[in-house]
Image: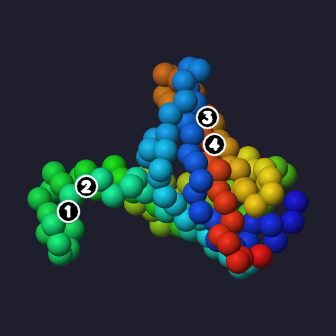
Amino acid sequence: MSRERFIGSWNLHRWIITSNGTSRHPFGEDAGGLLLYTDDGCMAVVINKPAVLAIPAGSPYRLPDTQKARLFDHCFAYAGQWRLEDNQVIHRIQQADNPHLIGSQQSRTFAFADNQLILSAMEEIAGKESRWHRLIWVRVAGRR
């Protein structure tokens, strides 16, 4: 698989988690997101829920801690390096909103369909269940 197909900007179309025969959209059906792959091996991703929180004008850092904590539930982001191995794209996390991800490698099975990139991964929840994540990304118009 050519690295060239990955390089560029991708908008989130859909994020679906399936577990025990049930599917859900963790950030809602209208979640937004941007995924970037660069030619020099860098990547970044941010996914967010639609703006449903009423935040007063000004800096969110001035909000009470309880409101700041709610903001954490509305955004997911990390950045680092990427490489291909067989049918997997591997993200080596260097920066993240969740410090437990830093230093980890996240493997995603990939597939391309027209202008879409489909990334999938199985998540094991400590002895409870397995969850299948499927993220469908659409290439940003006008790119590659």
**Amino acid type assigned to the residue bearing label 2 in the image:** Leu
State the residue in front, 84 or 64: 64
Q: Calculate the distance from the C-alpha at mark 2 to the C-alpha at mark 1.
A: 6 Å
The local crowd at label 3, few if under 14, some if 14 to 19, many if 20 or more residues have their Cα within 10 Å, is some
Q: Is residue 132 visible?
A: yes
Residue 27, position as x, y percentages in the image: 44, 46
Secondary structure state at the residue bearing disc 4: strand
Image position of 37 (left or right of 113):
left
Q: Calculate the distance from the C-alpha at mark 4 to the C-alpha at mark 1.
A: 31 Å
Question: Which is more N-terminal, label 3 or label 1?
Answer: 1
Q: Who's the residue at 67% across and 60% down the image?
A: 138
Question: Which is more N-terminal, label 2 or label 4?
Answer: 2
**Amino acid type assigned to the residue bearing label 4 in the image:** Arg
The local crowd at label 4, few if under 14, some if 14 to 19, many if 20 or more residues have their Cα within 10 Å, is many
Image position of 100 (left or right of 89):
left
Find disc 1 in the rendering and name its residue. Answer: 55
Image position of 112 (left or right of 34):
right
Q: Which mark is residue 132?
A: 3
Image position of 97 (left or right of 117):
left
The local crowd at label 2, few if under 14, some if 14 to 19, many if 20 or more residues have their Cα within 10 Å, is few
The local crowd at label 1, few if under 14, some if 14 to 19, many if 20 or more residues have their Cα within 10 Å, is few
Find disc 4 in the rendering and name its residue. Answer: 134
Residue 39, position as x, y percentages in the image: 73, 78
* Labelled pair 2, 1 in contact (Cβ < 8 Å): yes
Q: Who's the residue at 15% across and 66% down the image?
A: 56
